[in-house]
Amino acid sequence: MRNQSKTIKTESYKAYKFKQKIIPYLFLTPNLLIFGIFIILPALIGVYYSFHDVELLHMDELTFVGFQNYINLFKDKEFTSALLHTILLVILTVPLIYVISLSLALLIVKPLRAKGLFRASYYWPVMISALVVGVIWYFIVNGSSSMFNSFWTRIGFAESDTLGDPIFAWATVIIAIVWSRAGYYMIIFMAALLSIPVSLYEAADVDGATKWQKFWGVTYPSLRASRVMVMILVVMEIFKTYPIIVQLTAGGPNDSTMFVVQKIYETAFVDGAKEIGYASAMSIILLIFVTIISAVNFAANKGGTD
């Protein structure tokens, strides 16, 4: 009887341990399925198509071309121009979003009157559709009756064709992106700031540290994990920016604001040939760029750990 009781207990314990191991994976299964079906599978199909010559209207007619699509890409001046524009947009926009979102977070966590109002006003652009953001800024800066031209003429300048000038168009795109996204990353920084132990600041006060010394010695190092995450997310988001730009400038003037995602879309679905294979190769190159930059940032910051 004792041996039988021990056997039952052993089997019950094994079943319990098995459930402990398998149940977490069961909870993860729906997310893993969604990720696999809508992310991994399309990515693998894209890689497959990138080695073939295939058109949108003739998807059943595949011709294997090897690396020819990739070779043609770097001979394609329009693609290389769009890629350089995208890299420049990342270089100009990422630091702005990073600094502004961190500054807003530092401001919000302080004891201020109407803190909730300020927090909501900084965050509400995030809740607006990217297409709507493009429409809003289009009407703000474009046309003789726009807010920008009304102000511009009042201070003594001639009326400007804002979106018809490459420099103004770039400035408008950058401002619109920063305005619409800084609030989102502000929330991430704010959560990280609120998690910093007060005892660290109290110790700094005992040592006689100034506000700047507390920021650089306590606050900024404590945000390391959040800084890495924000930087990676911002870079990924800017690389795939499309709705705001297509609504605001449509790549103009003279393709000066043509970025990679718009070029991919037009190659696959708009241009005459509708080349799915060629557009897939563009997508893979974009993925490689994003992966390399994210990996370098992650390694440079040691993954956000000390």
Image (cartoon, grey):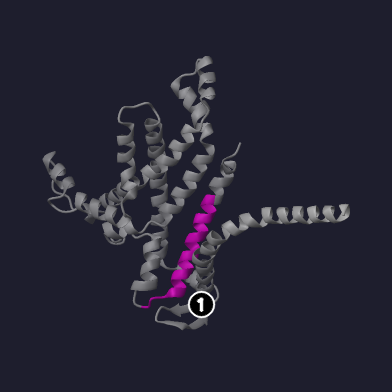
- Position of 123 with respect to 159 (left or right) is right
User: Where residue 64 sits in the image (x, y, percent)?
Assistant: 53, 80
User: Where residue 41 sits in the image (x, y, percent)?
Assistant: 53, 68
- Position of 31 with respect to 270 (left or right) is right
For image coordinates 33% across by 32% down, the residue present is: 115
Query: What kind of secondary structure does the magenta stretch mostly adopt?
Result: helix
Element type at marker 1?
A: strand
Q: Amino acid at mark 1?
A: His
Residue span colored magenta: 273-294
Q: Nearer the viewer, residue 29 or 246?
A: 29
Residue beneath disc 1: 52
Image quadrant for the N terminus? bottom right
Q: Nearer the viewer, residue 220 or 105?
A: 105
234 to 257, vertically: above or below: above
User: Where residue 17 sits in the image (x, y, percent)?
Assistant: 72, 53
Q: Nearer the viewer, residue 264 or 105?
A: 105
